């Protein structure tokens, strides 16, 4: 296990190096600069701004300085927000995004597994058909469209929730629903398929023949073995929720890291874009790392060697 963990961490560091390098050079390849949108910027002022942010130095010097800062945990200073460092802004704004993401992940797993389990138990019955129809709709409708529909129906028409903002407990409902709809639908279909396979397995028939009660069969055998595909999906699901929150935060005017990311792209804030991109990359890699570890811990029969290529 220790050797496996160390190897995964080494690959994570290599991936972060590639991500940081690619992001840096892609930002430099974009036409224009962070001061293009500024009105009536004289050549003298532009020169001073470039000197302040080190944009007047050769490319390799900028790259080495930036990579050295990342090693120290310093992502630089924002080029649009006066006297604000990128790491500090990420720390301040990530709280709202973390709350939104955690709620969406928890709701997605709980609701998705329950719907999939119900659909599997009542296979080929009305409730199974209804669940799968809802799952298809949840996968087909984009999160930004669902968010707008939820705003129009439950906030504008019915007045049950606020259209925008993230101040009280009720303000979590609409953005979490919009963000978790697609993962819930996917988990429900995945759980249903996996549970149906387990329910028809020979060891389930053996457990029934031994007189084991149905609740014990469900929780000890069916759920434990049928949940493994869902665990595998948690990593990609976390990635979808994190990246999807960028749009949702903008629609609901949530002051999270996603909103800052969109604004930094609009403003061509190089350091902010690169810092948030690397931060997102770290989160996604950690999610995949813990998913692999959890997969092995849930089912010890799975060998670590078989997960190396995953």
Image (tube, rainbow, N blue to C red):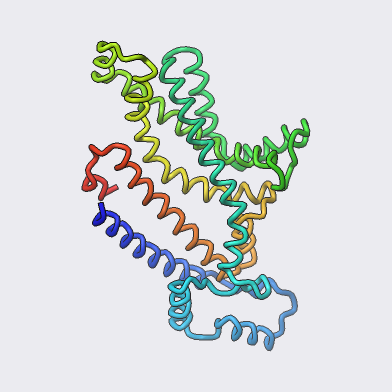
Counting every numbered tag in the picture gives: 0
Residue 45, located in which quarter of the rendered image? bottom right
Is residue 38 or residue 172 the one in the foreground? Answer: 172
User: Where residue 259 sits: x, y (%)?
Assistant: 63, 56
Q: Position of residue 78 (x, y in %)?
A: 61, 72
- What residue lies at 43% left-to-right and 73% top-to-bottom? 71
- Whether residue 142 sits left or right of residue 117 in the image: it is right
Q: Is residue 67 above or below residue 103?
A: below
Q: Is residue 4 left or right of residue 92?
A: left
Where is residue 17? Give x, y as percent: 39, 67
> On the rendered structure, is 128 left or right of 155?
left
Q: Is residue 95 above or below residue 264?
A: above
Residue sitting at 67 percent across and 47 percent down? 251
Q: Who's the residue at 34% across and 35% down the image? A: 228
Please tell me which residue is depicted at 35% across the width and 30% down the height of the picture. Answer: 224
The single residue placed furthest to the bottom in the displayed view is 44
Determine which quarter of the picture holds residue 260. bottom right
- Left or right side of 199 for 33: right
| Image coords of residue 307 (percent x, y) | 26, 46
Q: Quadrant of residue 175?
A: top right
Q: Nearer the viewer, residue 88 or 140?
A: 88
């Amino acid at each position: 296990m220790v050797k496996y963990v160390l190897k995964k961490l080494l690959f994570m560091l290599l991936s972060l190096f590639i991500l940081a390098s690619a992001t840096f050079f892609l930002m430099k390849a974009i036409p224009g600069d962070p001061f293009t949108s500024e009105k009536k910027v004289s050549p003298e002022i532009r020169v001073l701004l470039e000197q302040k942010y080190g944009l007047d130095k050769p490319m390799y010097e900028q790259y080495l300085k930036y990579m050295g800062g990342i090693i120290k945990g310093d992502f630089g200073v924002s080029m649009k927000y006066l006297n604000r460092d990128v790491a500090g802004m990420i720390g301040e704004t990530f709280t709202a995004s973390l709350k939104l993401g955690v709620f969406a992940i928890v709701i997605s797993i709980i609701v998705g597994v329950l719907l999939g389990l119900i659909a599997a138990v009542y296979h080929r019955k009305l409730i199974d058909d209804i669940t799968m129809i809802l799952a298809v709709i949840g996968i087909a409708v984009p999160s930004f469209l669902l968010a707008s529909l939820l705003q129009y129906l439950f906030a504008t028409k019915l007045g049950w929730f606020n259209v925008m903002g993230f101040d009280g407990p009720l303000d979590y409902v609409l953005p979490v629903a919009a963000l978790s709809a697609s993962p819930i639908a996917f988990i429900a279909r995945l759980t249903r398929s996996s549970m149906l396979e387990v329910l028809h397995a020979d060891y389930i028939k053996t457990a029934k023949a031994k007189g084991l009660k149905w609740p014990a069969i469900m929780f000890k055998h069916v759920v434990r073995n049928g949940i493994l595909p869902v665990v595998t999906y948690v990593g990609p699901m976390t990635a979808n929720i994190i990246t999807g929150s960028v749009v949702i935060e903008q629609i609901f005017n949530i002051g999270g890291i996603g909103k800052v990311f969109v604004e930094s792209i609009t403003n061509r804030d190089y350091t902010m874009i690169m810092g948030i991109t690397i931060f997102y990359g770290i989160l996604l890699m950690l999610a995949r790392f813990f998913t692999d570890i959890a997969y092995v811990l849930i089912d010890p029969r799975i060998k670590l060697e078989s997960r190396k290529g995953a």
